[in-house]
Image (spheres, rainbow, N blue to C red):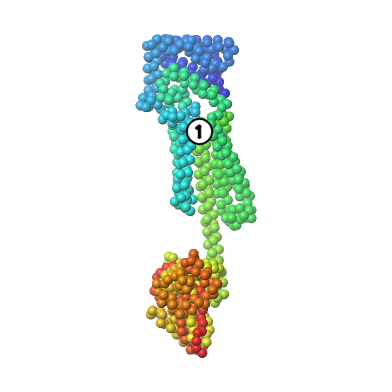
């Protein structure tokens, strides 16, 4: 529906539509540009306007209420163009005047024949792509669909590449790389829309198309604009339908998101301790108090940003089907600025609230940890519950512990049983210093201490101490007779796995004499048949690095108490970082009275 304008011409009021008004204004301005520069020209121009008013009166007498562009064209034909009224010389002067008035605006036209505008007549968003079609060539549809396809490829292809090459780290890449990269084309589009002028008059349209600005082309342009408007009335193109359907889908999703966000917002405002615990994983009143106002402000900003997107998507959907005019550039810029401001506010308050929550929780956790340490300190050492229960159950005592926060572990026992707990210590940054031992009363005789052990570095030992107890030092390469170093296999193979592999016929050792040690073979042969296959198959048939070590011929002459255990001590010049494990200690009497 065209908008009518009331104009005052020679003291009389007339109703005229917008397109007719533009043509009439250009016609009368052209006449005055010429005649006002001549003596008596003002009177001539006034006479012409009076004649136009008389012709409009005749139209009104015929029952015509609003003057259209066809009526104005008829009036111009009756009165004539500038050249018809003033002759060729006048026409040239008028053209010179018009050219001089438009000299600055036409500098770009003289360079390339066209000036880049946003096309207001064919715009869907801001008219940028329609302007590109006029300036660079090709149809508007090709530019629009090309932009959509290029944008999809721009978003999808980098995402596939990042996912393929970064795997688990793709979420960080999406946040810090892909999201800014994806919105780059939209930012460029927005900047072009802000800084590029929009066609507002028929002259702008002619400059956009690279056509000469004259009366004939202006008339044709106004007529084409009228025809285009009539063609578009009540009619939607495929592009309009595409935009409308997508905007409807987006509006639906945003409506659901707005409702969900509003529900969570209201729930938080009215949250009790129970609701906070089950919904927000916050179980302390001080945590809620710390983040209450930041969450309120952040929630308001989030709701505002969703509401702005929802309003704009609904408006775009309705305008794409021709039910309402599209937004002006000023409106688009205003809503975009408000949306960005609300989004920045949401992120800012969310970060502020997260910082306050972290600070509050950190202070509480420090207090709770200090209380936990106080209640879990035994004999000067801090134990977790699993470690303390193991030490109490098996009679172990911690003598020294530095640079480790655990004394036991589970998950890689030789049979693959993840529930078996064993002595263990680990630190990959600083050397572990540890002495763990237990005691047994013994009678006179000859004893052997054996244990299943593993380590990933040298300098770990089992030992035995006791009055009048002397061990056999044949195998210890200069070590004291009461010590034996734990073999460094890491968490694979181990002499237990090697001996079982040799017996099964699928493994050949580089040092078979070592593995033929009769004591080692005896210890391995004690392993139940049901566990042997489990040991071979553990850790994808690689074993977990467990080995048997032993201290043999420990002679006890009088009833006494033997103390044995495992140590990584600075007295042995240990400087390696890493871990060790030990279990299945057995002190057995093998001879003597």
In the picture, measured across the screen, residue 216 lies left or right of residue 272, that is left
The answer to which of 552 and 535 lies nearer the viewer is 535
Secondary structure found at label 1:
loop
Determine the residue positioned at 44% across, 19% down: 217
The image position of residue 268, as x and y in percent, is: 61, 50
Q: Quadrant of the N terminus?
A: top right
Count of all numbered marks drawn on residues in the image: 1
The answer to which of 440 and 12 lies nearer the viewer is 440
Question: In the rendered view, would you say 187 is above or below 511?
Answer: above
To which quarter of the image does residue 83 belong? top left
The image position of residue 369, as x and y in percent, is: 54, 64
Question: In the rendered view, would you say 326 is above or below 397?
Answer: above
Q: Which residue is mark 1?
A: 125
Answer whether residue 261 is visible to the viewer in this image.
Answer: yes
Determine the residue positioned at 57% across, 39% down: 249
The image position of residue 153, as x and y in percent, is: 46, 41
């Amino acid at each position: 529906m065209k908008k009518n304008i009331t104009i005052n011409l020679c003291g009389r009021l007339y109703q005229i539509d917008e397109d007719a008004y533009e043509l009439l204004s250009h016609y009368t301005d052209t006449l005055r540009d010429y005649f006002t520069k001549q003596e008596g020209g003002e009177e001539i121009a006034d006479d012409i306007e009076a004649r136009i008013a008389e012709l409009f009166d005749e139209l009104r007498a015929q029952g015509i209420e609003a003057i259209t562009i066809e009526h104005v064209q008829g009036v111009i034909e009756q009165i004539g163009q500038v050249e018809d009224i003033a002759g060729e010389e006048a026409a040239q002067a008028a053209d010179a005047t018009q050219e001089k008035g438009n000299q600055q605006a036409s500098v770009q036209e003289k360079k390339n024949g066209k000036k880049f505008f946003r096309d207001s007549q064919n715009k869907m968003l801001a008219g940028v792509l329609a302007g590109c079609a006029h300036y660079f060539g090709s149809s508007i549809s090709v530019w629009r669909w090309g932009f959509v396809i290029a944008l999809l490829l721009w978003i999808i292809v980098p995402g596939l590449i990042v996912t393929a090459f970064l795997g688990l780290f793709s979420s960080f890449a999406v946040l810090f790389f892909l999201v800014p990269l994806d919105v780059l084309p939209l930012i460029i589009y927005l900047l072009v829309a802000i800084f590029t002028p929009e066609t507002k008059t028929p002259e702008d349209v002619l400059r956009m198309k690279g056509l000469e600005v004259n009366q004939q082309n202006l008339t044709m342009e106004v007529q084409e604009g009228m025809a285009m408007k009539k063609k578009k009335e009540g009619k939607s193109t495929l592009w309009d339908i595409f935009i409308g359907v997508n905007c409807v889908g987006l509006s639906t999703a945003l409506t659901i998101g707005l409702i969900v966000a509003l529900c969570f917002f209201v729930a938080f405002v009215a949250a009790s301790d129970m609701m906070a615990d089950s919904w927000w994983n916050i179980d302390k009143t001080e945590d809620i108090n710390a983040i209450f106002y930041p969450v309120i402000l952040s929630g308001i900003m989030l709701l505002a940003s969703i509401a702005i997107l929802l309003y704009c998507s609904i408006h775009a959907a309705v305008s794409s089907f021709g039910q309402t005019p599209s937004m002006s550039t000023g409106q688009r810029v205003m809503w975009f600025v408000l949306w960005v401001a609300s989004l920045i506010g949401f992120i800012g308050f969310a970060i502020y609230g997260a910082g306050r929550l972290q600070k509050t929780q950190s202070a509480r956790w420090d207090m709770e940890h200090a209380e936990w340490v106080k209640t879990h300190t035994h004999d000067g050492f801090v134990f977790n519950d699993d470690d303390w229960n193991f030490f109490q159950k098996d009679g172990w005592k911690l003598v020294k512990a530095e640079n480790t926060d655990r004394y036991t572990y589970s998950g890689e026992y030789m049979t693959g049983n993840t529930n078996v707990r064993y002595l263990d210590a680990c630190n990959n940054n600083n050397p572990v210093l540890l002495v763990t031992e237990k005691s047994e009363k013994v009678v006179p005789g000859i004893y052997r201490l054996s244990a299943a052990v593993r380590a990933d570095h040298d300098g770990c030992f089992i030992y035995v101490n006791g009055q009048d107890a002397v061990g056999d030092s044949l195998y210890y390469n200069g070590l004291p007779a009461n010590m034996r170093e734990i073999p460094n296999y890491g968490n694979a193979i181990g002499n237990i796995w090697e001996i079982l592999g040799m017996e099964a016929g699928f493994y050949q050792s580089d040092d078979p004499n070592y593995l033929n040690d009769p004591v080692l073979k005896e210890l391995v042969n004690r392993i139940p048949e049901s566990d042997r296959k489990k040991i071979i198959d553990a850790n994808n048939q690689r074993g977990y690095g467990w080995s048997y070590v032993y201290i043999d011929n420990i002679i006890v002459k009088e009833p006494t108490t033997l103390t044995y255990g495992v140590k990584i001590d600075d007295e042995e010049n240990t400087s390696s970082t890493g871990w060790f494990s030990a279990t299945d200690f057995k002190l057995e009497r093998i001879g003597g009275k």
